[in-house]
Amino acid sequence: MAAIVRLSSVCRRGVKPLFYQSALLARPVVVFHKEQQLHPLTARIHSSPPLYAGSDSNAASLHWTAERVLSIALLALGPGAYFCPGSVIDYSLAAALTLHGHWGLGQVLTDYVHGDTKVKLASAGLFILSTVTFAGLCYFNYNDVGICNAIALLWSK
Amino acid sequence: MALLLRSVRLAAPMGTTAKEEMNKFWAKNSRLNRPMSPHITIYKWSIPMMMSITHRGTGVGLSGAISAFAMAALILPGNYTHYLDLIHSLSVGPFLIGLAKFGIAFPLSYHTYNGIRHLCWDIGKGFKIPEVYRTGYTVIGLSVITSLALILM
C-alpha cells in the first residue's frame, strides 16, 4: 500500500520531501509501507490492555470520566464515614480508596515510564500493589475494628 | 488528481493511535540517545507549578501510606488496638503527637481541596490566570485551617 503521492513530485524530487509538505503532515491517510513491514509483530503485542487499542475506541475518554465520577464518590464518602460509621462505609472506602489510588498511580506511570517492557513491568507491579492493598483493607475490615473505627481510635489519642 | 487526494484525505481516519504516536516519539528519541531538555532546572518555579506537583506528591504519599497500612494488617501478628496501646505506652508527648496528626491531616486536606479545584477545571471553570492563583491560595489556606481544626478535635 504505497503512500498516495503526486506522480510529478516523486519524479522530480523523490519521496522524502513529500513528507515535509505541510499539506501531507496534516492527516496522513496511509502509513508508509516500509514501517508496516518492519512492525507487524510488535503491533500485535500490546503493552496496554486491549481496551485502548485502535483509533476508534473511546475507552480512554470513558476511563477519564470514570476517574472523575469515582473522585466525586470518594468526596461523598468522607462526610459519610464521619456521620454514619459502619461496615458499608468501611468496605466502600476500601474499594474507592484503592481504585482511586490505582488509577492515580497509573497516571503517574504513564507520565514517567516509557518503553514497552518497562511499562508492562510497572503496570504489573502496580496491579499487584493495588490487589494486596485491597485485600489488606478488606482483611482489616473483617477481622479487626474497621477503617472508620480505626481512624476514630487513632484520633482520640 | 490533487482535488481527489484532498477529498480522500478529509474522509479517511488516522492511521495510528495516539498511544502508538507517543511510543514512536519515545522510541526514536531514546534510540538516538538524545538528552532530555532541561525543564524544572531552568524554568522559574510558580505557585501553580508547585501546587500541581504537591498534589501529585500528596497523592502518591497517601496511597503509599494506605498500602503500607494494608500490608501491615496482613503481615503483622497483633491486632489494631494492640499496636495503638503500644504507641500510647511510648508517652510521646503532645507536641509530637500533634505533629504526627498534622503529617496525616495536611496531605489529606490539601489533596482533597486541590482535587475539588481540579474537578472545577474539568467542568471548564476557573482557567483565567487570576482565578488560578485565587483558587490556589484558597486551597492552601483551607488546607492549613482544616488541618489545624482536625488536630484540635
Image: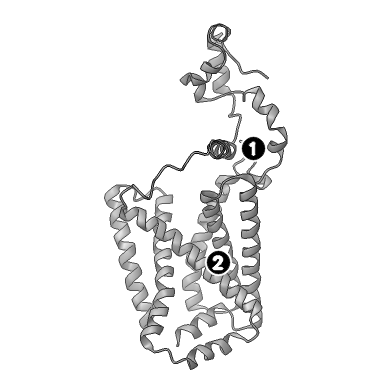
* Residue drawn at the location 56% of the way across and 46% of the way down: A114
Residue A120, image x, y percentages: 65, 51
Chain under numbered label 1: A
Residue B31, numbered circle:
none
Q: Is residue B143 left or right of residue A15?
A: left
Considering the numbered disc 1 on the image, is that residue within a helix, a strand or a loop?
loop
* Residue drawn at the location 62% of the way across and 40% of the way down: A57
* Residue drawn at the location 57% of the way across and 36% of the way down: B24
Q: Is residue A36 left or right of residue A113?
A: right
Q: Which residue is mark 1?
A: A54
Q: Is residue A89 left or right of residue A21?
A: right
Q: Which residue is mark 2?
A: A97
Considering the numbered disc 2 on the image, is that residue within a helix, a strand or a loop?
helix
> Residue flagged by tag 2: what amino acid is it?
Leu
* Residue drawn at the location 42% of the way across and 89% of the way down: B92
Chain under numbered label 2: A
Residue B143, image x, y percentages: 35, 68
**As drawn, A121 above or below A115:** below
Label 1 packing within 10 angstroms: few (<14), some (14-19), many (20+): some
Q: Quadrant of the C terminus of chain A?
A: bottom left
Label 2 packing within 10 angstroms: few (<14), some (14-19), many (20+): many
Does residue B116 appear anywhere in the picture?
A: no
The numbered mark, 2 or 1, whose residue comes first in the sequence reads: 1
Residue A93, image x, y percentages: 56, 70
The answer to which of B105 and B45 lies nearer the viewer is B45
> Residue flagged by tag 1: what amino acid is it?
Gly
Does residue B103 appear anywhere in the picture?
A: yes
The answer to which of B34 and B125 lies nearer the viewer is B34
**As drawn, A1 above or below A117:** above
Q: Quadrant of the N terminus of chain A?
A: top right
Residue B5, image x, y percentages: 56, 14
Mark 2 and mark 1: Cα distance apart in space: 30 Å
